[in-house]
C-alpha cells in the first residue's frame, strides 16, 4: 500500500533511505536476535539443571532399588523404570500395528472421501489433551477392570495411533508409483506388493514416525495418573497398579522431602536419557539395516 | 498450479490401483481354468487395512461416547449451570466448573501474550535474517524444547522458576507495572509474591508452546515466494520493510493458525501447569495469586474421586476440554492449510 504510493510518484533521483527507516530496520533486527536469545535461555537452563542436579543424584542404588517409605533417605526407581518399560511395551504392541495399518489404508486405499475423514480424525485425535485420553482409558479399562499397567498402555496406545498413521501415510506416498507398477507387472499380488515392496522401501521413514510417537508418549504423565496409578513396590503383573518413571518424578517433585527432590532430578535425567537413547538405538539399527534394501 | 516436478500420487493417469480394482470388481465369466491369482488374500488384506483405518474413526467415536456416558449424571443434575457457577464442593456434591474454566483461559491467554512475539521473532530471524549455516541448528534447538516431557518442565519450574519469580520478578513487576499510574488500576500485579500462581503457569506454558508456534510460522514464512521478497526490495524497501510488507502480510493467516495450534496445546497442558499454578479454586484478579485449570483439577482429583457425582463432574470437565480443543485445532489446521496449499493469504499481491 505505502509502497504502491512510492511507485506512483515519478522520482528519478534515488533518495537515500531515511534515518528513521534505517533505525527501524536495525532495531527490528536487534529485537529478532533478542527473541532468539530469550527463547534459548530456558532451553539451556533446563538442560543445564537437569545435567548438573541429575548427574549429582544418580547412583547405583537409585537405579536398582525400590522407593523407601516417605521421609527416609535412599531408595531408587528401579520398579518405575521397569514399569514404564511394561507400559510402553503394551502401548507399542497395541498402537504400532494399528497405526501402521491405518497409514497403509490411508496411502493405498484411502484416496477418497472416507480416507479424508480418517485423515482429519487422526489430526483431531492428535490435538486431544493427554489427560482426556487418560479419562477414556479409565472409563474403558479401569472402571470395567482394574487400575493397571494395561490401562496406562491403552491410553498411550491411543495417543500413538494418529502420529504413526499420518507419518506412515506420508512415507508410503513418497515411494515411487513405478515401484508398485513393477511389482504388479511381475504378477505379485497387491498385499504382497504393499508389504514387501512399498512398506519395505519406506521402512526407515515409518520407523522414524514410530519413534516420534514413542518419544512423545514415553514422557507422558497425565494419562497415567489414574490408569496405572503408581506403585511403591515391584509389580510385573499387567492387572495391578504399576510404578512409572514420569509418575515418580511428579510425586517426588511435589513432595516436601529434600531427598525426594534429589531423586526427582535424577529420575528426570534418567527419563530423558532413556527416551533419547531408545530413539538413537532404533535410528542406528534402521540405518544399518536399510543399507542392503533401500 | 501443479508443479510437474513433484510426484503426485493422487493425479489421474498412471494408476494401477484403479486398474486392479476393475479386475476384482467387474463381474466375469466362470474361468475354465482356476488360477490362484491371490484374489482372496488381497481382499483379506484390504479389509484388514480398512479396519485399521476405521479404527481411527472408532477411537474418536469411543472417546466421545465414553465422555458423554460418564458425564451424564452431572449434566442432568446441573445442566449449563455447571459451567457458570463457582461452587466446587465434592463433599456436598455441589459442582460448578467456572474457576477452572477461568484459570484455563487466563493462563493460556497469558501464555500466548508471552509466546507469540517471541515465537514469531524466532521464526522471522531463522527464515529471513540469520546466516544460512545457523538456520538448521537454531531451529533444531528450538524444536528440542518440544521434546522435553511436560513433567520435566514442571520439575524445573518448581525448583528454578518459582523461586526466581517470588524473589525477583514479581516484586519487580509490582514496583513497576503495578504502580497505580501504570497498570495498578487493573489489579493484575498486586498481592503477595508467592511464586506459584497464574503468572508462573503462563510463563511455563509459553516456554512449552513457543516451539509449536515458531515451527509452524517458519513453515509458512518459507512458503512465501522468493520473488515477493525481491519485488519489495527492488522498490527500495529496507529488510524490515520487506519482511513486514512482503512476507508477514502474506503469511499472517498461517501464523495465526500456528498461534491457535499453540493455544490448543496450552489449553490441554496438564502436568507442568498443575505443578506451578498453586491449585486454588479462588478466582483472583492478581496474576501472582494461585489459580486452577480444567486439566489440573482432573490431574489432582480424578484418582481420588469416590462418589459417582464427583467422577461425573470431572469427566464433564474433560468433555468440555475435549470439545474446545477440537474446535480450536480444526480452526488452526484450516488456517495453516490455506497458506501452505499455495493459496495466498491476501488477495492483493
Image (spheres, rainbow, N blue to C red):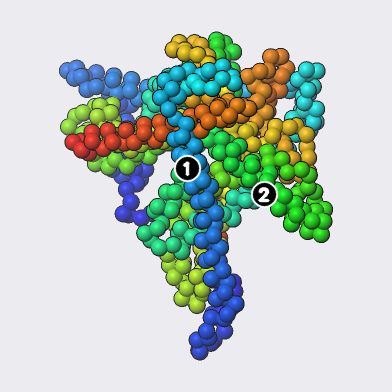
Residue B76 against residue B20 in the figure, above or below? above
Please tell me whether mark 2 sits on a helix, a strand or a loop: helix
Residue sitting farthest toward the bottom: A13
Q: Residue B131, position in %: x, y? A: 40, 63
Residue A178 circle label:
none
- Residue bearing the label numbered 1: A47
- Residue bearing the label numbered 2: B168
- A266 or B84: nearer the viewer: A266
Number of disc labels? 2
Residue B129 against residue A91 in the figure, above or below? below
Q: Residue A245, position in %: x, y? A: 49, 25
Mark toward the viewer: 2 or 1: 2
Residue B291 against residue B167 in the figure, above or below? above
Q: Residue A58, position in %: x, y? A: 44, 30
Residue B193 shown left or right of residue A211 in the figure:
right
Q: Residue A193, position in %: x, y? A: 25, 30
Residue B83 shown left or right of residue A268 in the figure:
right
The reply to whether label 2 and label 1 mark residues of one chain is no
Please tell me whether mark 1 sits on a helix, a strand or a loop: helix
Residue at 58% x, 29% y: name it. A258
- Name the quadrant containing residue A250: top right
Residue at 27% x, 22% y: name it. B39
- B196 or A259: nearer the viewer: A259
Residue at 73% x, 17% y: name it. B309
Amino acid at each position: 500500500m505505502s509502497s504502491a504510493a512510492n511507485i506512483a510518484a515519478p522520482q528519478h533521483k534515488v533518495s537515500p533511505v531515511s534515518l528513521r527507516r534505517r533505525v527501524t530496520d536495525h532495531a527490528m533486527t536487534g529485537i529478532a536476535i533478542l527473541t532468539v536469545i530469550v527463547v534459548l535461555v530456558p532451553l539451556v537452563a533446563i538442560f543445564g539443571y537437569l545435567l548438573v542436579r541429575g548427574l549429582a543424584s544418580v547412583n547405583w542404588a537409585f537405579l536398582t532399588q525400590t522407593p523407601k517409605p516417605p521421609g527416609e533417605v535412599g531408595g531408587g526407581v528401579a520398579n518405575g523404570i521397569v514399569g514404564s518399560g511394561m507400559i510402553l511395551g503394551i502401548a507399542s504392541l497395541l498402537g504400532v500395528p494399528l497405526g501402521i495399518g491405518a497409514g497403509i489404508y490411508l496411502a493405498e486405499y484411502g484416496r477418497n472421501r472416507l480416507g479424508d475423514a480418517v485423515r482429519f480424525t487422526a489430526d483431531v485425535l492428535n490435538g486431544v489433551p493427554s489427560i482426556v485420553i487418560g479419562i477414556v482409558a479409565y472409563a474403558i479399562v479401569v472402571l470395567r477392570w482394574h487400575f493397571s499397567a494395561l490401562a496406562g498402555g491403552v491410553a498411550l496406545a491411543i495417543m500413538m495411533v494418529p502420529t504413526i498413521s499420518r507419518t506412515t501415510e506420508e512415507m508410503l506416498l513418497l515411494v515411487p508409483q513405478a515401484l508398485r507398477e513393477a511389482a504388479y507387472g511381475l504378477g505379485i499380488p497387491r498385499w504382497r506388493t504393499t508389504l514387501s515392496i512399498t512398506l519395505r522401501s519406506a521402512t526407515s521413514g515409518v520407523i522414524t514416525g514410530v519413534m516420534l510417537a514413542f518419544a512423545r508418549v514415553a514422557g507422558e504423565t497425565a494419562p497415567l495418573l489414574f490408569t496405572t496409578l503408581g506403585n511403591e513396590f515391584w509389580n510385573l503383573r499387567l492387572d495391578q497398579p504399576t510404578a512409572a518413571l514420569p509418575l515418580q518424578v511428579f510425586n517426588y517433585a511435589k513432595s516436601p522431602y529434600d531427598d525426594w527432590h534429589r531423586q526427582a532430578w535424577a529420575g528426570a535425567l534418567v527419563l530423558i536419557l532413556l527416551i533419547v537413547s531408545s530413539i538413537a538405538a532404533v535410528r542406528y539399527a534402521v540405518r544399518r539395516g536399510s543399507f542392503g534394501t533401500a | 498450479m501443479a508443479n510437474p516436478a513433484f510426484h503426485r500420487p493422487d493425479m489421474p493417469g498412471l494408476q494401477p490401483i484403479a486398474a486392479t480394482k476393475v479386475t476384482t470388481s467387474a463381474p466375469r465369466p466362470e474361468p475354465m481354468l482356476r488360477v490362484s491369482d491371490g484374489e482372496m488374500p488381497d481382499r483379506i488384506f484390504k479389509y484388514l487395512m480398512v479396519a485399521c483405518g476405521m479404527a481411527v474413526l472408532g477411537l474418536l467415536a469411543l472417546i466421545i461416547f465414553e465422555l458423554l456416558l460418564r458425564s451424564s449424571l452431572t449434566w442432568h443434575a446441573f445442566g449449563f449451570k455447571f459451567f457458570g457457577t463457582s461452587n466446587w464442593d465434592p463433599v456436598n456434591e455441589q459442582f460448578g466448573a467456572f474457576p477452572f474454566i477461568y484459570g484455563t483461559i487466563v493462563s493460556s491467554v497469558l501464555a500466548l501474550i508471552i509466546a507469540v512475539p517471541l515465537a514469531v521473532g524466532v521464526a522471522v530471524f531463522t527464515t529471513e535474517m540469520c546466516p544460512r549455516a545457523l538456520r538448521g541448528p537454531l531451529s533444531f534447538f528450538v524444536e528440542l524444547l518440544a521434546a522435553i516431557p511436560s513433567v520435566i518442565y514442571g520439575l524445573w519450574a518448581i525448583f528454578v522458576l518459582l523461586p526466581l519469580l517470588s524473589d525477583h520478578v514479581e516484586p519487580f513487576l509490582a514496583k513497576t507495572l503495578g504502580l497505580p499510574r501504570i497498570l495498578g488500576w487493573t489489579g493484575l500485579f498486586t498481592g503477595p509474591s508467592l511464586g506459584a500462581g497464574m503468572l508462573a503457569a503462563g510463563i511455563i506454558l509459553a516456554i512449552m508452546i513457543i516451539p509449536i508456534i515458531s515451527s509452524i510460522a517458519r513453515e509458512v514464512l518459507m512458503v512465501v515466494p522468493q520473488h515477493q521478497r525481491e519485488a519489495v526490495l527492488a522498490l527500495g524497501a529496507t529488510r524490515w520493510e520487506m519482511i513486514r510488507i512482503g512476507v508477514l502480510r502474506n503469511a499472517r493467516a498461517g501464523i495465526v493458525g500456528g498461534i491457535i495450534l499453540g493455544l490448543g496445546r496450552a489449553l490441554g497442558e496438564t502436568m507442568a501447569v498443575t505443578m506451578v499454578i498453586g491449585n486454588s479454586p479462588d478466582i483472583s484478579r492478581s496474576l501472582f495469586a494461585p489459580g486452577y485449570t480444567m486439566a489440573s483439577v482432573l490431574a489432582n482429583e480424578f484418582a481420588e474421586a469416590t462418589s459417582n457425582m464427583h467422577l461425573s463432574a470431572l469427566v464433564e470437565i474433560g468433555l468440555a476440554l475435549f470439545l474446545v480443543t477440537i474446535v480450536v485445532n480444526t480452526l488452526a489446521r484450516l488456517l495453516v492449510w490455506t497458506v501452505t496449499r499455495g493459496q495466498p493469504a491476501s488477495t492483493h499481491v
